[in-house]
């Protein structure tokens, strides 16, 4: 959740510590409000399980990160109040 909060408020580039960049990010990617990577092209689970947030580019206030926070909040509320 901290990643979504920070990117929503400040924007920028996030990369997991195991990410290796072999060339600079293109300026075209920075033109979008939010960019995340598609996970495993030969793997076909339902959306949103196909998104990999290990590398993300964002502009401040991007709607994508607002929706991520809503999704995270709903998920955690479900876990907290769900009785197994």
Image (cartoon, helix red, strand yellow):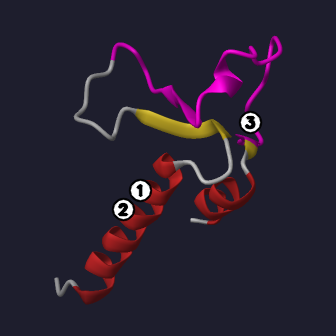
Residue 69 located within the stretch drawn in magenta: no
Give me the C-alpha separation between circle 1 and circle 2: 6 Å
Q: Main secondary structure of the magenta part?
A: loop
Q: State left or right for residue 29 relative to residue 17.
A: left
* Eye-nearest disc, 1 or 2: 1
Q: Dot 2: within a 10 Å radius of its alpha carbon, few (fewer than 14), some, or many (20 or more) residues? A: few
Q: Which numbered disc, 2 or 3, marks the residue that appears first in the sequence?
A: 3
Callouts 1 and 2 close, C-beta under 8 Å: yes
The residue sitting at 76% across, 43% down in the picture is: 12
Q: Is residue 25 above or below residue 62?
A: above
The residue sitting at 33% across, 69% down in the picture is: 75
* Residue marked by disc 1: 67
* Residue marked by disc 2: 71
The residue sitting at 73% across, 31% down in the picture is: 19
- Secondary structure under the numbered disc 2 in the rendered image: helix
Q: State left or right for residue 56 relative to residue 68.
A: right
Q: Dot 3: within a 10 Å radius of its alpha carbon, few (fewer than 14), some, or many (20 or more) residues? A: few
In the image, residue 54 lies at what x, y percent? 61, 39
Per the rendered image, the range of residues in magenta is 13-42
Residue reaching furthest left? 84
Q: Which numbered disc, 3 or 1, marks the residue that appears first in the sequence?
A: 3
- Secondary structure under the numbered disc 3 in the rendered image: loop
Q: Dot 1: within a 10 Å radius of its alpha carbon, few (fewer than 14), some, or many (20 or more) residues? A: few
In the image, residue 16 lies at what x, y percent? 71, 42
* Residue marked by disc 3: 18
* Eye-nearest disc, 3 or 1: 1
The residue closer to the viewer here, 23 or 17, is 23
């Amino acid at each position: 959740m901290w990643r979504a909060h920070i990117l929503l408020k400040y924007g920028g580039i996030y990369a997991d510590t195991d990410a290796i960049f072999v060339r600079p990010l293109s300026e075209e990617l920075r033109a979008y409000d939010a960019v995340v990577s598609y996970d495993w092209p030969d793997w076909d689970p339902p959306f949103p399980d196909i998104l990999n947030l290990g590398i993300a580019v964002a502009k401040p206030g991007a709607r994508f990160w607002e929706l991520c926070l809503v999704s995270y909040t709903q998920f955690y509320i479900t876990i907290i109040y769900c009785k197994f």
